[in-house]
Image (tube, helix red, strand yellow):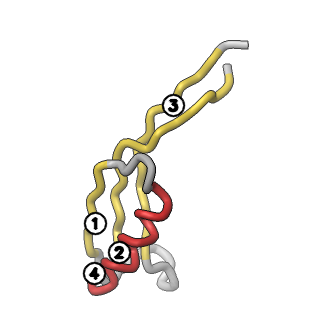
Amino acid sequence: MFVVAFRVRLARMFVTDISRWAEFGQAHHESFADHPPATTMVEVQRLIDPAMLIEIEADAIVVTQSE
């Protein structure tokens, strides 16, 4: 089997500075403009790497095909 297509259905964004929501939202829009997934943005105190500003978790539907 191999992947034919996938579509992100849900994205969760964990951000360390919610005041930058518009920047994060713009990047999200640029990535998913054609088929935007349901999205949640949550502010967290910190991520595992202090240099990280955002972590994105996504659920997708994958379509496979047998050879």
Using the image, determine if residue 23 lies above or below residue 37: below
Q: Would you say the residues marked 1 and 4 are in contact, meaning their CB atoms lie under 8 Å apart?
A: yes
The amino acid type found where label 3 is placed reads: Val
Mark before the other along the chain sequence, 1 or 3: 1
Q: Earlier in the sequence, mark 1 or mark 4?
A: 4
Measure how far apart labels 4 and 3 are at the Cα level: 31 Å
Find the distance from the CA under tag 2 to the CA under tag 4.
6 Å
Circle 1 packing at 10 Å, graded few (<14), some (14-19), many (20+), is: some
Q: Dot 4 corresponds to which residue?
A: 18
Tell me the quarter of the picture where residue 39 sits: bottom left
* Residue position marked by numbered label 3 in the rendering: 62
Q: Quick one: quadrant of the C terminus?
A: top right
Q: In the current view of this chain or complex, which residue is farthest to the top?
A: 67
Label 1, label 3: how far apart the Cα atoms are: 24 Å
Say which amino acid is labelled 1: Met
Figure check: 65 above or below 30: above
Between 43 and 5, which is closer to the camera in this rendering? Answer: 5
**Which residue is pictured at 50% across the width and 78% down the height?**
49
Q: CA distance from mark 1 to mark 4?
A: 8 Å
Residue nearest the observer in this picture, 56 or 5: 5
Give the SS element for disc 3: strand
Query: Which residue was labeled with disc 1?
Result: 41
Q: Amino acid at mark 4?
A: Ile
Whether 26 is drawn above or below 16: the answer is: above
* Residue occupied by mark 2: 15
Residue at 41 percent across and 46 percent down: it is 35
Marks 2 and 4 close (CB-CB < 8 Å): yes
Q: Are marks 2 and 1 in contact (CB under 8 Å)?
A: yes
What crowding class fits label 4: few (fewer than 14 Cα within 10 Å), some (14-19), or many (20 or more)? some
Mark before the other along the chain sequence, 2 or 3: 2
Mark before the other along the chain sequence, 2 or 1: 2
SS class of the residue under badge 1?
Answer: strand
